[in-house]
Amino acid sequence: TIAIAISGSAKSKNVVKWALKEFGSEKNVIFKLIHIHPKITTVPTPSGNIVSISEAPEDVAATHRRQVMQETKDTLLKPFKKMCERKKVA
């Protein structure tokens, strides 16, 4: 198992490319992409303002957290997953 901490930077892409080149052809290799989410402390309001997450209703805060997680999967992780898929590694 190869674990790689990633951000959206070019350096992260280069590290993943290197790891795929070095270890991607090994049998039964599994790549784990790790991204640590920064703590969500604010929530946008419909009027365009920002409020502390502790001041927002719990259902609004939970929905915002889910949206942030989904956006991260869609924008940050997707290119890295595609790189792994092209090399046919899990």
Image: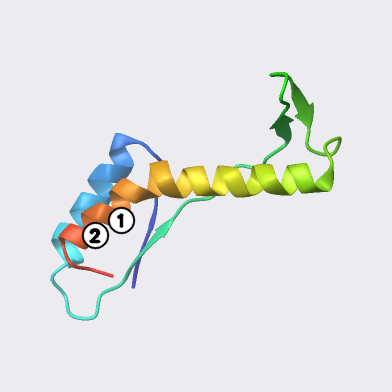
- Residue 3 location, x and y as percent? 38, 63
Residue 72, placed above or below residue 82: above
* Quadrant of the image occupied by residue 29: bottom left
Residue 79, placed above or below residue 31: above
- Residue 9 location, x and y as percent? 35, 36
* Quadrant of the image occupied by residue 52: top right
The crowding category of the residue bearing disc 1, from other C-alpha atoms within 10 Å (few below 14, some 14 to 19, many at least 20), is some
What residue is shown with label 1? 81
- Given residues 60 and 43, the one toward you in this image is 60
Q: Residue at the front extreme?
A: 46
Point 27% across, 44% down: residue = 13
Looking at the rendered structure, the kind of residue marked 1 is Lys
Q: Check disc 2 and report its element: helix, strand or loop.
A: helix
Looking at the rendered structure, the kind of residue marked 2 is Cys
Point 19% across, 53% down: residue = 18
Horizontal side of 54 relative to 90 (left or right) equals right
Horizontal side of 32 relative to 79 (left or right) equals right
What residue is shown with label 2? 84
